[in-house]
Each structure stands twice: as C-alpha cells, then as structure tokens.
Image (cartoon, rainbow, N blue to C red):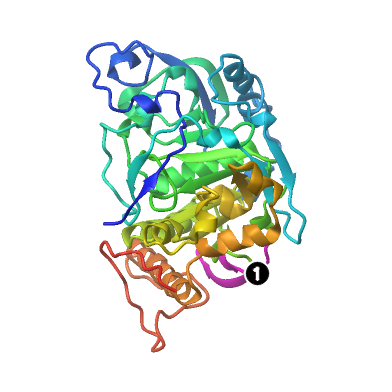
Amino acid sequence: MLRIKRVPTVVSNYQKDDGDVLVGGCGRNCLRDCCIHGAKLPLYAHKKMNETTPEKAVSPTGAKEIPVAFLDSLLLGEVWEDRMEKGLFRYDVTACETKVIPGNYGFVAQLNEGRHLKKRPTEFQVDKVLQPFDGNKFNFTKVGQEEVLFQFEASEDGEVHFIPSAPIDVENSPSVVAINVSPIEYGHVLLIPRIFECLPQRIDYESFLLALYMAVEAGNPYFRVGYNSLGAFATINHLHFQAYYLAMPFPIEKAPTKKITVIHEVKIFELLQYPVRGLVFEGGNSLQDLAKVVSDACIFLQDTNVPYNVLIADSGRRIFLLPQCYAEKQALGEVSSELLDTQVNPAVWEISGHMVLKRKKDFNEASEENAWRLLAEVSLSEPRFEEVKAMVFDAIACRAEEEAELKPLPFKEAVPVNNKGSSVMVSGNHGCLVRQ
C-alpha cells in the first residue's frame, strides 16, 4: 500500500468538520437528513439531446429562447456574485496574478497562494483508483445548502426550464452544481451527479453523459469540464466533476494529434508533441455515442487501476483522456525535490496547461521549459502508454461486442494488443505500473 502525505484542496466551507457525528439538526443547513427535509433549491432543467451530435447541440436550428442563460447568468453572473457577496469563498480569485508564459504553447501561470492555506494534512492512498465510499469522511452531502447553486437535471418535455425554488427529491437523488470555495478561476464549480447516492469517485456512462450535457449547455469553448480519478489528485472520494471558465485556449487544445481509429463513429486520436501522453475523442452520431465510448475507456482504466484525468473541451466536442502516474512516483520517491518543493499537484487543469502555482518564486520563474519538465513526470512512459492504449481499445471493442451480442464490431481499424495480433483482456485490480 502506497501513501503520501497529502494536503487536500478545501472545496467546501464544511470540509474541515468531516469527523462530526450529527444527531438531529446540525444547524448548518446541510444536505443530510438532519436539514434536507422540506428544503428547496433552484432547478435548471436542461434539454435531453437524444440522438444529437455535440455540433448540433451547440448550434440548434430554430432554438427557443431559454429562460436563463446557463453560463452567463448562473455560473458567471448573478448567482456567482451572490455567493461572493455572502463571503463563501476562501479568497478572491479575481485578485490572483495570471500570465501567459512565453513559448510555443502558451502555458498559463496563476499565482494562487490561497489554495494551500488553512488546510489540514491527511493520509491519502494513491495506488488504488477505486476505493469504497466512506460516509464518515467529508462528502458533498455535508456542504451547506448556500454553497449549492442549483439542481441540474434533464427536462421532461425536451425544453429548457429554470425554476428559482424547486423541492429537492431526495429519493430520486438529483444532480447538483455547487461552488468550489477554493476556486482556480471565476465560475469554478463542482458537478455532483446523483448526490444522495453517495457514489465513490468513479465514472460511469450516466455521470459522464451528464458532464457532457453541462459542457454543451454552457455552449462556450472557454468553459471546460474536468475530472480527476483517485490516484490522479482527486482529493474527495465522492463522485464529482469540476468546471470553470478561462477565456484563452489551453495548451493541450493546441497540441497536434494523430488519428488512430474509429469506434461507433467516434474518432480517436493520440496527442503528439505534448509532455503528457493521452488520447483525444471526437465525433460520434450522437452525444450518447461519444459518452459511451469515452466512459468505456474510463471504466477500463478504473478497473485495471490506472489513474487518469479527463478534460471535456470545445463545448463537449473534444474529450482528452490522460492516464498518469505522478502521485505514485511521489510515493516511490522518484520525483526530484525541486519539483516536490513547488507543491504543485498536477491534476487535470495543470496537465491541460493551466499551471496553478503556490509560490511567488515559481510564478516569477515560470517558463515553458519548467512547465514541460513537471508535466513530463506526470506522463506514462511510452512503452507503458502503448500497452495501456492497446488494452483500452480492446476493452471498448469487447464492450461493444457484448452489447451487440457478438455482432461485427463497428470500427474501421483493428488495433492488436500484442505482436501476434491477438486480443488480451485484463481484468481485476492490478497495480499501477509506473517504472520507466
């Protein structure tokens, strides 16, 4: 068992109180049984896009005027400002210094000293991507209702609706969007699927489709949705995605790619000339097809104990899947003290090129070379990545076979797992291999 001393990001004002045992009302207006009965929260009902491609979903023909703008009003406007005025954030993210680092990729450096203040050290196991949900530890049912912006659910009639005050249907476990009280950027929020089911940090098809819906609903390429698995710098084992708005391209979005294969009309590419090796998914006949292929890949990585990060970009049109091994290298003592001293935990945002730095020295000395050197330590080695990539394709194909009852696979190029051209499925809880 590998553990490293972790200092997790505080995402809720009630995270420090995770050891409390509550009897009766807790007085904090939280989302648990003691406070939830009779409570109401705003509800944003998004259009359920059956058999709709991401391209069509972002630019619908003859679309009706929606009652409230999802991104401008809910996430970046009145609601966010309201929470700022109430003093719910641990610092003013708009005061953080930000600059674009000179170079070919334009890495973004932010000095965010507030993110490492007022935190408590903890022991975090980094060699198990799947860990059971533990209700005694902090989870999102413990957040205050004032930290929740709105419920996010599919509309029943196919149209967008916004209800300022809607009952919370605990039995049907709504998904909610809450603020991140330690934001990286303006509008930094958490998407928590089916919150009352208390799911561990593990992607499934339904949760990933919901995250895609959120990216599509925002309809802005500068609003990205991210995911960190356990072992890849998720610090809370309660299923959640993160999202925020940054009005510039991420370096990873500008990296060249090479097309590898097509599965269910979803094109799969490999990142080139970027410090972290990864896959890029685009297309599909529907948003559901895209969600199915990507979630199948994520499920395989989880089940075979490979930590990973996901970036949903370009309003849901492009998904980056990035297996990584930095946390385990830390635990094994394979990361230089120079990199460790930066205190940067390279999760999805850092890997994508938004470098959140915690020391003034690192911000002043930020360079493309330094960013590249850190992210290169995050990446799987080329042999290990090729092995994982081949197994991911094989797993997606096998799942497609199961669903089609062994009908011919609808992909154009077969990718053999080994030199003999045969396929090998790997199952069970295997250790994450990180040796170079």
At x 53%, y 18%, the residue is 163
Q: Is disc 1 surrounded by few (<14), some (14 to 19) or many (20+) residues within 10 Å?
A: few
Q: Name the spot of residue 55 as percent of width and height, x first.
A: 65, 50
Q: Amino acid at mark 1?
A: Gln
At x 51%, y 47%, the residue is 343
Left or right, residue 99 beside residue 236? right
Asked whether 133 or 56 is in front, the reply is: 133
Name the magenta segment's main secondary structure.
strand
- Span shown in magenta: 255-271
Asked whether 374 or 152 is in front, the reply is: 374
Q: Name the spot of residue 281 as percent of width and height, x first.
A: 56, 60
Q: Is residue 203 visible?
A: yes
Q: Is 260 included in the stretch rendered in magenta?
A: yes
Q: Residue furthest bottom?
A: 420
Image height check: is 35 above or below 68?
Answer: above
Q: Secondary structure at mark 1?
A: loop
Question: Which residue was labeled with disc 1?
Answer: 273
